[in-house]
């Protein structure tokens, strides 16, 4: 089975909130992309059940994808929320992938 077949999209969301939410805001240095796992309810953060990491990818203007950032949250030692600054005009879309140690890999995308 290909890795992509293991990735769960927002429509598969269960009781806990696993889908990485992407929010954009402008700043004087660029566009701030804030990623939080769980839009209304932040994902649990315990040693037994946590988000280990989130990766952010961008679709550039020629249709290729590039990795923008990896946010590491440890093993239940920090809340699954972080921000990066991008030049919004460089991208057509953004995709975030989050990893839950119990429930696998989840993704979410936004068009710019």
Image (tube, helix red, strand yellow):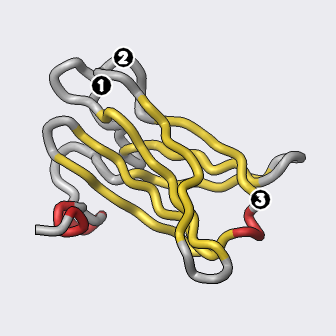
Q: Residue at x 67, y 70 (%)?
A: 91
Q: Which residue is mark 3?
A: 87
Q: Residue at x 19, y 48 (%)?
A: 104
- Residue 47 image-quadrant placement: top left
The answer for how far apart the CA atoms under marks 2 and 3 are is 30 Å
Residue 35 at x, y percent in the picture = 51, 46
Query: Is disc 1 placed on a helix, strand or loop?
Result: loop
Q: How many marks?
A: 3
Q: How far apart in space, not on screen, are marks 1 and 3 (Cα)?
A: 31 Å
Residue 68 position in % (x across, y down): 59, 52
Rendered position, 28 above or below 93: above
Q: Which mark is residue 77?
A: 2
Earlier residue among tags 1 and 3: 1
Instruction: Report whether 11 appears left or right of 77.
Output: left
In the rendering, at what x and y percent does residue 64 appear? 55, 76
Crowding at mark 3 (Cα within 10 Å: few <14, some 14-19, many 20+): few
Q: Residues within 10 Å of mark 2 (few under 14, many from 20)?
A: few
The residue tagged 1 is: 45
Query: Residue placed at 38% from the left, 54% from the top?
Result: 97
- Of the numbered discs 2 and 3, the one sitting upstream in the chain is 2
Residue 20 versus residue 15: which sits nearer the camera?
20
**C-beta proximity under 8 Å, tags 2 and 3:** no
What's the residue at 82%, 47% (across, down)? Answer: 27
Q: Secondary structure at mark 2?
A: loop
Quadrant location, the N terminus: bottom left
Q: Label 1 neighbourhood size at 10 Å, few (<14), some (14-19), many (20+)?
A: some
Which mark is in front, 1 or 2? 2
The reply to whether callout 1 and callout 2 are in contact (CB within 8 Å) is: yes
Residue 65 in the image: above or below residue 71: below
Q: x, y percentage for residue 101?
A: 20, 35
């Amino acid at each position: 089975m290909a890795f992509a077949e293991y990735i769960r999209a927002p429509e598969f969301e269960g009781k806990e909130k696993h889908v990485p939410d992407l929010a954009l805001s402008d700043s004087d240095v660029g566009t701030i992309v804030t990623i939080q796992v769980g839009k209304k309810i932040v994902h649990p953060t315990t040693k037994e059940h946590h988000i280990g990491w989130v990766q952010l990818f961008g679709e550039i203007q020629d249709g290729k994808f590039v990795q923008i950032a990896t946010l590491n949250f440890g093993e239940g030692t920090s809340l699954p929320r972080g921000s990066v600054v991008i030049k919004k005009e460089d991208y057509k879309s953004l995709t975030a992938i989050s990893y839950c140690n119990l429930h696998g890999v989840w993704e979410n995308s936004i068009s710019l």
